[in-house]
Amino acid sequence: MIKFFRRIRFDLMEKNKTGTSADRASHEALAEAQASAKAGKYFKYAIGEIILVVIGILIALGINNWNESRKNQNLERIYIQELKTDLIKDSTLISTMLNQSNKQLRAKYLLHKYLVENTDFDFFNNNFNHFPDFVKTNNYNVDSLSSYFQIQWNSESQYAFTPITTTIDEMKSIGKIGVIKNQELRRSIIETYNSYESYKLNYENKYQKSIEEIYKLVFDEIPALYTMDNSNLIEIFKDQRVRNRFEGNFVIGQNGSLRQLKQVNQKLLDELNLYSKR
C-alpha cells in the first residue's frame, strides 16, 4: 500500500501536479523566470531589429545626400563656367561701348574747351571739373570742331547694352541660385546683374532720351549740319536750346557709369576664376 501511494506521489511530482507548497512555489517561480527570460530575448531581438532598420534608413539617407551633393557640385561647376562665358561676352560689349563713349567724351571736352576759350559761353566753365582726367590732356583741332559736335549725336553713339543673361535667368527660373555654395560669391552674382539692370534703367534710358531730343532739335532745323563749317557751329551755339542740349546730353554720366559697369563685370569675373580654382 505504501509503495502504491509512493508511486502516485512520484507520478504527480513528475507531472508537477502535487507536492508541497514550497515545491509548487518554486516551480511557479522557475516558470515565471523562464517566461521572463524568454520575453527579454524577444525584446532584445525587437530592439535589434529596430536599430538595424534605423541604421539602414540613415545609410540610405546618407547615400542619397551624398549623391545630391555630388550633383549640386557638378551643377555648380557648370553654372560657374557658363557665367564666366557670359561675363566675358559682356566685357567685350562694355569695352566696345566704352571705347566709343571715350571718343564721344573727348569730342565733347574739346568742343567744350574751344567754346569756353573763344565765345562768351561762360556757363561751360562750371562743367570742366566733371570731365575725367584722361580727356584733359587732349587739345582741339580747329578744323575738326564740327566733327566734335557731330559725334555727340551720330548713330555710332546710340549704342545699347544688351548683357547675356541666359545662365542667370535659368538659375533663377529653376531655383538653382543656391547651388553656388559660397554666400559672398552668390551675393556678388546677384549684385552684378542688378547693376546691369540699374544701368539700363537709370543711365542708358536717360542718355537715349537726350540723344533723341538733340537729334530732333538740331537735325530737323539744321539738315546741313554735316557739311557746315566752324563758323556755322558757333551760330548754332547761339541758340539757347542747343547749348542746353549739348550741356545736358549725359555723355559724362554715361561714360562714368560704363567705366563702373566694366569694373563690376571684371570683379565678378575675377571672383569666379578664383573660386573655380579651389
Image: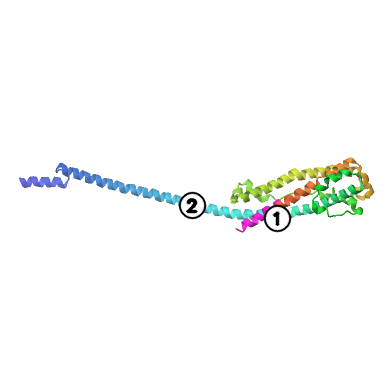
Side (left or right) of 93 relative to 23:
right
- Residue count near mark 2 (Cα–Cα under 10 Å), binned few <14, some 14–19, many ≥20: few
Q: What residue appears at the point 38 percent right and 49 percent down from the top-left corner?
A: 49
The residue at the far left in this view is: 1
Q: What residue appears at the point 51 percent right and 51 percent down from the top-left corner?
A: 65
Majority secondary structure in the magenta region:
helix
**From where the camera sits, is residue 50 visible?**
yes
Q: Which residue is mark 2?
A: 62
The residue at the far top in this view is: 240
Q: Which residue is mark 1?
A: 88
- Say what secondary structure mark 2 lies in: helix
The residue at the far bottom in this view is: 277
Residue type (three-letter) at the residue carrying disc 2: Gly
- Residue 97: assigned label: none
- Residue closest to the eye, 131 or 51: 131
Residue 189 falls inside the magenta stretch: no
- Residue closest to the eye, 88 or 56: 88
Side (left or right) of 266 relative to 76:
right
Looking at the image, is mark 2 or mark 1 earlier in the sequence?
A: 2
Please state the horizontal and vertical placement of residue 238, each as a whole percent of the image: 92, 42
Side (left or right) of 122 relative to 42:
right
Q: Which residues are magenta?
A: 264-277
**From where the camera sits, is residue 86 visible?**
no
| Callouts 2 and 1 close, C-beta under 8 Å | no
Residue 268 falls inside the magenta stretch: yes
Q: What residue appears at the point 43 percent right and 51 percent down from the top-left corner?
A: 55
- The colour scheme applied to this rendered structure is rainbow
